[in-house]
Amino acid sequence: MQTWLRFLIVAWLAIGSALGLARENVAVDWVLLAELPNEAQKTLVLIKNDGPFPYRRDGVVFGNYEKRLPLRQRGYYREYTVKTPGSRDRGARRIIAGRADDYYYTDDHYRSFRRIQDTPSRRQAVATAAHGASSPDVPTTTTTPTTITGPSDASRNSP
């Protein structure tokens, strides 16, 4: 009986550890800052300037209890309200700010998140230009491809 109990405990710990590691690498979609509603863009400016914030609860610790964002120690994430036009209360829209300047937007009260990116990266621009679309982890952007040219044949042959 004790052998089976030990086996069950070890199996339980192994499975629990595997699930815990899987949650560390949470897949979150991306959104460009320019694609966010104006209210969210204004809220992000306030966050980066340390306020002043219009809501008393802005800046409180976000617990990430549903583990929809990458796992971090308690206190790493802070939440801020994004004004919702026509709403009498705080509404469902929030920006979650991490200590390492990582920002996440939710418009459905924490059911889903998109990581905010200020500008498209070079990798995204190249992927968009080359494939006409981006990969699932790269936000869709519209870019103009640039051509990089090397020295002409004439300059290579000159002394």
Image (cartoon, rainbow, N blue to C red):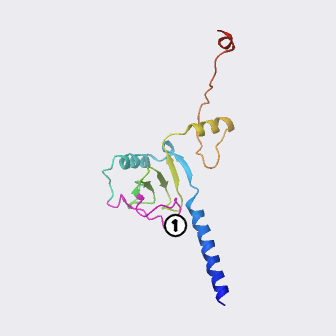
Say which quadrant the N terminus sits in: bottom right
Q: Is residue 144 above or below residue 1?
A: above
Q: Residue furthest bottom?
A: 1
State the image quarter where residue 139 is shown: top right
Which of 79 and 152 lies nearest the eye of the viewer? 152
In the rendered picture of this protein, how many numbered marks are placed on residues? Answer: 1
Q: Name which residue type carries label 1.
A: Glu
Q: Residue at x 61, y 80 (%)?
A: 9
Which of 87 and 148 lies nearest the eye of the viewer? 148
Is 75 part of what is drawn in magenta?
yes
Judged left or right of residue 117, residue 9 is right
Q: Residue at x 55, y 39 (%)?
A: 121
The picture places residue 111, in percent across and down from the top left corner, at 53, 62
Is 125 part of what is drawn in magenta?
no
State the image quarter where residue 112 is shown: bottom right
Label 1: element kind: loop
**Which residue does the numbered mark 1 point to in the structure image?**
66
Judged left or right of residue 92, residue 12 is right
Judged left or right of residue 68, residue 1 is right
Q: Which residues are magenta?
A: 56-78
State the image quarter where residue 23 is shown: bottom right
The picture places residue 95, in percent across and down from the top left corner, at 44, 54
Q: Residue at x 62, y 67 (%)?
A: 18
Judged left or right of residue 6, residue 106 is left
Say which quadrant the C terminus sits in: top right
Q: Residue at x 49, y 62 (%)?
A: 110
